[in-house]
Amino acid sequence: MANKDNTCTLQIDYPCQWLYKVIGSDREKLRQALLEIVSGDSCTISPSNSSRTGKYHCLNFEVTVKSEKQRNSIYLAIKSHPHVKIVL
């Protein structure tokens, strides 16, 4: 068991591909929101699962990030968008 003096830091080598899982109720509005966030940077958006009732949809959003600051900035932009319910 680790004590609170032991810390683990994840080492990520940038640039790298980063995958966000983004959930919302309107798949097309969600896709447009993601394209606006990266505005010109290349990305891949692919459908993932939908809820059983079809109320919620998940998209895989993969983008090349150049730094931790950029990765976190994209995450916060996605999270704060009104069409996004959850981002992982």
Image (cartoon, grey):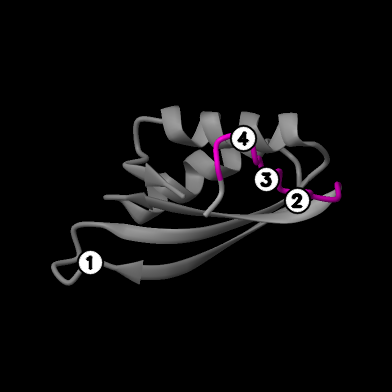
Residues in magenta, as a range? 3-14
Q: What element carries label 2?
A: loop
Residue type at mark 1 is Ser
The residue sitting at 85% across, 50% down in the picture is 13
Discs 4, 3 touching: Cβ within 8 Å: no
Residue type at mark 2 is Ser
Residue to which mark 2 is pinned: 42
| Earlier sequence position, callout 1 versus callout 4 | 1
The residue sitting at 65% across, 41% down in the picture is 6
Residue to which mark 3 is pinned: 8
Magenta-colored segment: predominant secondary structure: loop
Cα separation, mark 3 vs mark 2, equals: 32 Å
Q: Which of 71 and 13 is in front in this view?
A: 13
Residue to which mark 4 is pinned: 74
Q: In which quarter of the image is residue 86?
A: top left
Residue type at mark 3 is Cys
Q: Is mark 1 on a helix, strand or loop?
A: loop
Q: Is residue 88 left or right of residue 67?
A: left
Cα separation, mark 1 vs mark 2, equals: 28 Å
Magenta residue check for 4: yes
The disc at residue 51 is 1
Cα separation, mark 4 vs mark 2, equals: 13 Å
